[in-house]
Image (cartoon, rainbow, N blue to C red):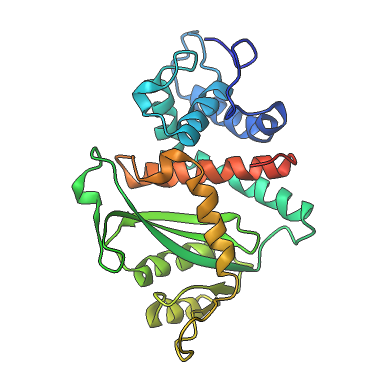
Amino acid sequence: MTSSRQRQPYLSDLSDARWALMESTLTAWRAERQKTSLNLGGKLTDLREVMNAILFLNRSGTPLRYLPHDFPPHTTAFGYVSAWTADGTIEKLDPHLHRMVHEQAGRTPEPTACVIDAQSVKTAPSVPTDTQGTDAGKKIMGRKRSIVVDTLGLSLLVIVTAASVSDDEAGKQLLTQLATDHPTITKAWGHTDYKTQAIQHGATLGIDVVPRNEQVKGLSVIPRRWVVERSFGWIMMHHRLARDCETKPAHSESMIRIAMISNLAKRATAKHL
């Protein structure tokens, strides 16, 4: 397999510094897998090239089968995404990078407040209809991405559902996971669609959910709302995410996480988006 140091680089390739932030997690994953494999001495796929292939797909929007030949085969790249999704490896890449970026920004390592929002997107023709729905408010047939970001706009959680799932219901799921994964968070800002159920559920978890003030007539600016809108903007810079192309919602979540991990790694190494 041609390595990234021998072939001509792509703009989406990991730099040495960014790969160093991910290498230990992915090599530890491989070491664990080898304990239960036959390990017959076959040639191992370059993990850095696998991640480069996934980043290329994500950023360029290229269909999986059109992956350039100087990357690992598209079936190999997809196999790694599936394995890393199933066992939570992609999520393990996140926490260390978050703490690093927070400390570089002069913040505490763990966030204490967050912003919640949702985005409904259309799906590719290959997406199973039983994983889709219609967002009645936005008149979009597809899936809904519900995310939690910290006050720097860095992604903390993401869940992908049918677009027909209400923001209130998705918000309850996010808040439950948030209380477990980020117990230091005590305040969350959300828009009008996070109603009584989400607010009451947050209160039981020790999280003060602050929605838009519906008593104010006309335009009402929600505190920190621009932060999460910018986060969606970062996500949409990855052309594969302009619509949902993944067969399984869990794979959609992984591709969103990979986009945000790429953002985190660039920030941690003082690179641009």
Q: Is residue 159 left or right of residue 221?
A: left
Q: Residue furthest left?
A: 129
Q: Nearer the viewer, residue 219 or 79?
A: 219
* Residue at the image point whose x is 45% and y is 41% from the top: 255
Q: Is residue 18 left or right of residue 236?
A: right
Q: x%, y% of residue 234?
A: 55, 49
Residue 47 visible in the picture = yes
Quadrant assignment for the C terminus: top right
Residue 93 visible in the picture = no
Q: Residue furthest bottom?
A: 215
Q: Nearer the viewer, residue 268 or 172?
A: 268
Q: Nearer the viewer, residue 200 or 243?
A: 243
Say if 245 sits above or below 199 in the image.
above
Q: Nearer the viewer, residue 118 or 257?
A: 118
User: How many circles with numbers are drawn on the protein?
Assistant: 0
- Residue 231 image-quadrant placement: bottom right
Q: x%, y% of residue 97?
A: 66, 46
Q: Is residue 147 left or right of residue 122?
A: right
* Residue at the image point whose x is 49% and y is 17% from the top: 71
Q: x%, y% of residue 191?
A: 46, 74
* Residue at the image point whose x is 47% and y is 59% from the top: 147
Q: x%, y% of residue 79?
A: 39, 27
* Residue at the image point whose x is 52% and y is 10% from the top: 1
